Amino acid sequence: MKIFNIIFFGFLTSILTSTSSEASAARTLMEEGMQLTKKLLVVHSSPNPLKTSFSRKLAKHFVDGLQARFPGYYDVEELDLELNTPPRVTESTIGSVFTCDPKTPEEEAYEAVSSKLVRQLKSSDAIVISTPMQNFTVPVSLKLWIDAVTRAGQTFQFTDHGVEGLVKDRPVMVVAACGGNYFGTEYDHVVPYLKPTLSFIGVEKFFSVEASATALAGAEDSVANARVELDRHLDSFKEATRSSSN
Ligand SMILES: Cc1cc2nc3c(=O)[nH]c(=O)nc-3n(C[C@H](O)[C@H](O)[C@H](O)COP(=O)(O)O)c2cc1C
């Protein structure tokens, strides 16, 4: 009986030990897996649908390229600002913008949208923004998103050394399309606007690719060049992707 007990308990112990070590190995693998998957936030702002929008198509080309080259590495989350345009800051909501402390139902409603967008942005490890040029700058939907996510205490803060951006370490790729030939001219307020604005909230790894003349003869060349340029950025964008998760 004693011998039987020894054999039985030895057997049980070995099962329990192997089960718990396997579970711990699986947990480690899962954690590594979780760390390996990076959230890629893709923000679209063209009023045109994918079928006709140059900026959307080019952004898709880049995201497809990332997924083909780095299978399973990016977990893509899309935000379509044409379908989900953030609300405008108005007289009845402006009170909460700087305090993040809503007092009225209108302020609470704005704060809820803004906080959700801030959380979405801050949880990203890499960002792609597609935008048309509209009257020399970005569409109003993209401007409203920037208003909603540029929040003191949340995406930037005031310190003794000045303003500190809190959306650090992750790259942004801006893919922009313009009907004429205005990129790089004094009329251009797309990348020259987005780059410092995103830098203000901490984004320093800034990439951009532009397709000009989408409404002119030569659009095909311009789009083909943009595709080549986007392909060239695949490795450096992946390298720049935030290495530790929140
Ligand atoms: C309201 C509006 C304003 C525009 N403003 C400009 C402009 O300032 N300069 C320009 O070259 N093209 C302008 N365009 C043309 C767009 O930039 C062009 O069609 C671009 O391809 C749109 O991007 P998408 O193809 O991704 O939708 C404008 C188009 C619209 C609808």
Image: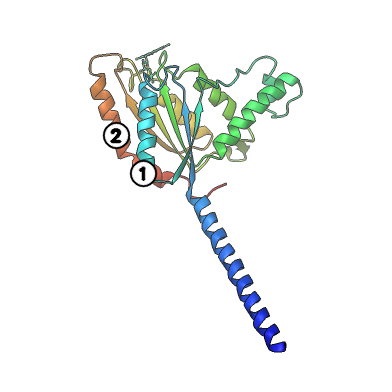
Horizontal side, residue 228 vs residue 172: left or right:
left
Residue type, mark 1 in image: Ser
Q: Is residue 173 visible?
A: yes
Residue position marked by numbered label 2 in the rendering: 229
Residue at 62 percent across and 31 percent down: it is: 116
* Residue closer to the observer: 123 or 100: 123
Secondary element at image label 1: helix
Q: Is residue 97 visible?
A: no
Task: Identify the image quadrant of residue 105.
Answer: top right
Task: Identify the image quadrant of residue 28.
Answer: bottom right
Residue at 42 percent across and 19 percent down: it is: 49
Residue at 73 percent across and 26 percent down: it is: 102
* Residue closer to the observer: 142 or 181: 142
Q: Check residue 82 in the rendering and tell me which mark sits there, or answer none.
A: none
Which corner quadrant of the figure contains ligand 1? top left
Quick one: which residue is furthest to the front in this view? 1
The image shows residue 165 at horizontal and vertical percentages of: 55, 37
Quick one: which residue is furthest to the right in this view? 103
Q: In the rendered image of this protein, does residue 142 appear above or below residue 119?
A: above
Residue position marked by numbered label 1 in the rendering: 236
Secondary element at image label 2: helix
Q: In the rendered image of this protein, does residue 117 appear above or below residue 213?
A: below
* Residue closer to the observer: 223 or 29: 29
Residue type, mark 2 in image: Glu
Q: In the rendered image of this protein, does residue 53 appear above or below residue 43?
A: above
- For label 1, the crowd category at 10 Å Cα-Cα, with few meaning under 14, some 14 to 19 and many 20 or more, is few
Give the CA separation, mark 1 to mark 2: 12 Å
Q: Earlier in the sequence, mark 1 or mark 2?
A: 2
The image shows residue 133 at horizontal and vertical percentages of: 40, 18
The image shows residue 38 at horizontal and vertical percentages of: 48, 45
The image shows residue 89 at horizontal and vertical percentages of: 62, 18
- For label 2, the crowd category at 10 Å Cα-Cα, with few meaning under 14, some 14 to 19 and many 20 or more, is some
